[in-house]
Image (cartoon, helix red, strand yellow):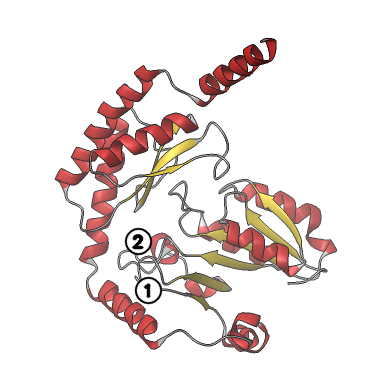
Amino acid sequence: MGQRDLVLYDELAHNSIFVGAQMSGAQRMAFAHNDPDSLERLLVQHRARYRHCLIVSEGLFSMDGDGPDLARLVEIKARHRAWLMIDEAHSLGVLGRTGRGIFEEQGVDPQEVDIWMGTLSKTLVSCGGYVAGPAALIEFLKFQAPGMVYSVGLPPTAAVAATEALDLMLAEPERVARLRANGQRFIGAVRAAGFDPGSSWGLAVAPVFIGDSLQTVLLSERMMERGFATVPVFAPGVPEGQARIRFFLSASHCDAHIDAVVATMAEEQRAVAQSGLSVSRVATDAIRARSQDSDG
């Protein structure tokens, strides 16, 4: 992609997608999250003015745990003579009966997607990443992408670790089935406890929305003290008011783990709420204190 081209990406896409588009020099526009109609409107308005157009989305969004309607994206990109790239960093090994990703989950021919990319550092427990697509694209990248031209290949140990993990994933689809069952149990439990998981599909990535950033951090710390590894996500990583605790489910979790973490979260959330601490409360107190110091 270059200055005469257009990159359209989901507004919640990973920062690496935005930075990559920015570095390409192409014009960049975001469409509303998982909203094909928003994407279509941008294409109708702007596509004719650009040489090439690339649409970028994710198979499973890392902060919200949901994903796109892949068939709609394929249909739209074909109608507007665009390319489609899907980032499967979080969806490989998670979506589909055998973990092959969103195309298997939604019954879409993978050949309809022009570029697949992902990481080796999550499901494939290694380091590095991959790009998959037509042979002509791969040859082009080998001779044009600076990371290939001026660097070296993966260490053999990293490549072997990823390959072995991939072989295990395909040979033992029951792992993917257990992961799906665990995710559904978790989402059901958090909803029953009165928490909001947003639009998450309940497949490996499961956020629980708290809202206030400070309360989210406090709750996460209290959960850690109780023995549960939790990840708080707050502004600027997500918009203020949409802070959340992000949970990652695995096939090795059992029902007891899931039930215990939800029960503990509900208990600790009550304690945090009773404390009355919040970003707005702390900010107000700080402003009042500063004002009093100035008066003195």
Placement of 91 over or under 264, stated as above or below: below
Lateral position of residue 19 relative to residue 193, left or right? right
Q: Say which quadrant the C terminus sits in.
A: top right
Lateral position of residue 166 relative to residue 139, left or right? left
The picture places residue 50, in percent across and down from the top left corner, at: 81, 65
Residue kind at label 1, given as amino acid type: Ser
Please rate how many residues cluster around mark 1, counting C-alpha atoms within 10 Å: few if below 14, some from 14 to 19, many from 20.
some
Please name whichever residue, 161 or 91, is drawn nearer the observer in this view of the structure: 161
Please rate how many residues cluster around mark 2, counting C-alpha atoms within 10 Å: few if below 14, some from 14 to 19, many from 20.
many
Please name whichever residue, 45 or 3, is drawn nearer the observer in this view of the structure: 3
Q: To which residue does mark 2 refer?
A: 94
The picture places residue 122, in percent across and down from the top left corner, at: 38, 65
Residue at (41, 61) in percent of width and height = 91
Lateral position of residue 293 relative to residue 26, left or right? left
Q: Distance of mark 2 from mark 1, alpha carbons?
A: 16 Å
Q: To which residue does mark 1 refer?
A: 126
Residue 80 visible from this viewpoint: no
- Mark 2 vs mark 1: in front: 1
Please name whichever residue, 259 or 43, is drawn nearer the observer in this view of the structure: 259
Residue at (72, 62) in percent of width and height = 22
Q: Earlier in the sequence, mark 2 or mark 1?
A: 2
